[in-house]
Image: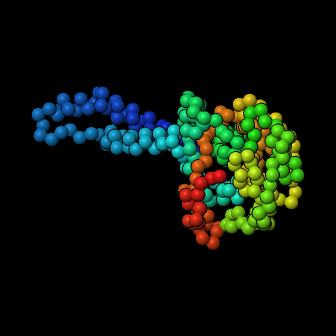
C-alpha cells in the first residue's frame, strides 16, 4: 500500500518539522514574551499535536519500514499455505534495509533462499504488494511440466495427500489435489488442478528470482509475467497473526493465529 506508506512518511516529517521549528524559534519567543507571568506560556494547538503525535508516528514508521510490516492475503494464490483472510507479519530486514516509498536498499543483509515466501511489488503492478514462493534463484533453470517443478533438470518429488476441501472465500478450490512438494530443505503443500497451467522452461537471470504461488492452478506468477527483480522485494513472510473471513462458518479461525509460514 504505497499510498498509506506515503501518508505516514509525510505526516511523520511534517509533525517533526513543526516540533523542531517551534523548539528552535517560536518557543523562545513565547517564553520571552511571557517572562514575569505566573503561568508558563501554552503551546499553540498545532505544536501541541505535533509534539504528541511525532514520537508515535516515527515509531510506527520505523517498525513498518525496518522491522516488520502487516499484510493481508487478498487472493487464493498461496493456498493451502495461506488462506484468504489471513493477516501476516513480514520481516523487513531479512533481505536488507530499504527506504520507505522508494524501496531502495541502503543496507545489504541477506538474500532470498529457495522456498522463502516473499512479499514484493510485481514489475507490471509496481504499486501493489504480492506474495509468492521463491522457486528459482539466479542462474537456475526452472521447468514446469505435467504439474511438476524441475530445478536444473531434477524433477522434484511429490506425495499425494488427498483432495482439498476449501473454506470461506477459498471454497472454490475444493476438489483440487493436495500434494506435498519436496523442495530441497523446504517441503510444503501445494494445490493442483486436473489441467496444467503455463508449462515451460525458464533460466533465471542474475539479480532476479522465479516465484510461484502454492496454488499452482490459480496463481499469476513468474510462469506468466517473468522474473522478479531483487529490487522489488519487500520482505520475508514470517507468520499468521490473525485470520478473518466473513464468508467462513467461523469468521475468525483461531487455529491459524501464530502459525509459522513454511
Q: Is residue 200 above or below residue 192?
A: above
Q: Position of residue 140 (x, y in %)?
A: 78, 36
Looking at the rendered image, the quarter that the N terminus falls into is: top right
Q: Residue furthest bottom?
A: 249
Q: Position of residue 3 (x, y in %)?
A: 57, 42
Q: Position of residue 234 (x, y in %)?
A: 61, 40
Q: Nearer the viewer, residue 43 or 59?
A: 59
Q: Is residue 199 visible?
A: yes
Q: Position of residue 4 (x, y in %)?
A: 54, 44
Q: Is residue 105 above or below residue 154?
A: above
Residue 242 found in image quarter: bottom right
Side of 247 relative to 42 (left or right): right
| Residue appearing at x 47%, y 39% in the figure | 62
| Residue appearing at x 68%, y 64% in the figure | 169
Side of 75 relative to 105 (left or right): right
Q: Is residue 7 visible?
A: no
Q: Is residue 130 above or below residue 98?
A: below
| Residue appearing at x 51%, y 42% in the figure | 67
Colour mode of the rendering: rainbow
Q: Is residue 224 above or below residue 99?
A: below
| Residue appearing at x 56%, y 41% in the figure | 92
Side of 5 relative to 217 (left or right): left
Q: How many marks?
A: 0
Amino acid at each position: 500500500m504505497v499510498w498509506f506508506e506515503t501518508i505516514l512518511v509525510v505526516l511523520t516529517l511534517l509533525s517533526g518539522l513543526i516540533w523542531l521549528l517551534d523548539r528552535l524559534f517560536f518557543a523562545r519567543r513565547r517564553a520571552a514574551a511571557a517572562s514575569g507571568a505566573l503561568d508558563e506560556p501554552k503551546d499553540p494547538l498545532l505544536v501541541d499535536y505535533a509534539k504528541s503525535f511525532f514520537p508515535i508516528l516515527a515509531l510506527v514508521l520505523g517498525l513498518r519500514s525496518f522491522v516488520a510490516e502487516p499484510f493481508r492475503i487478498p487472493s487464493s494464490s498461496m493456498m493451502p499455505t495461506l488462506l484468504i483472510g489471513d493477516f501476516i507479519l513480514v520481516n523487513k530486514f531479512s533481505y536488507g534495509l530499504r527506504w520507505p516509498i522508494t524501496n531502495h536498499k541502503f543496507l545489504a543483509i541477506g538474500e532470498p533462499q529457495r522456498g522463502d515466501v516473499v512479499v514484493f511489488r510485481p514489475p507490471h503492478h509496481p504499486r501493489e504488494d504480492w506474495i509468492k514462493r521463491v522457486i528459482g534463484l539466479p542462474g537456475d533453470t526452472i521447468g514446469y511440466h505435467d504439474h511438476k517443478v524441475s530445478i536444473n533438470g531434477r524433477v522434484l518429488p511429490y506425495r499425494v495427500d488427498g483432495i482439498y476441501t476449501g473454506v470461506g472465500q477459498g471454497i472454490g478450490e475444493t476438489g483440487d489435489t493436495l500434494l506435498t512438494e519436496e523442495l530441497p530443505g523446504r517441503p510444503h503443500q501445494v494445490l493442483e488442478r486436473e489441467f496444467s497451467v503455463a508449462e515451460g522452461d525458464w533460466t533465471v537471470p542474475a539479480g532476479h528470482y522465479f516465484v510461484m504461488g502454492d496454488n499452482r492452478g490459480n496463481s499469476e506468477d513468474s510462469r506468466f509475467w517473468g522474473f522478479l527483480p531483487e529490487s522489488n522485494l519487500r520482505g520475508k513472510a514470517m507468520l499468521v497473526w490473525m485470520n478473518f473471513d466473513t464468508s467462513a462458518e467461523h469468521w475468525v479461525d483461531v487455529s491459524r493465529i501464530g502459525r509459522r509460514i513454511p
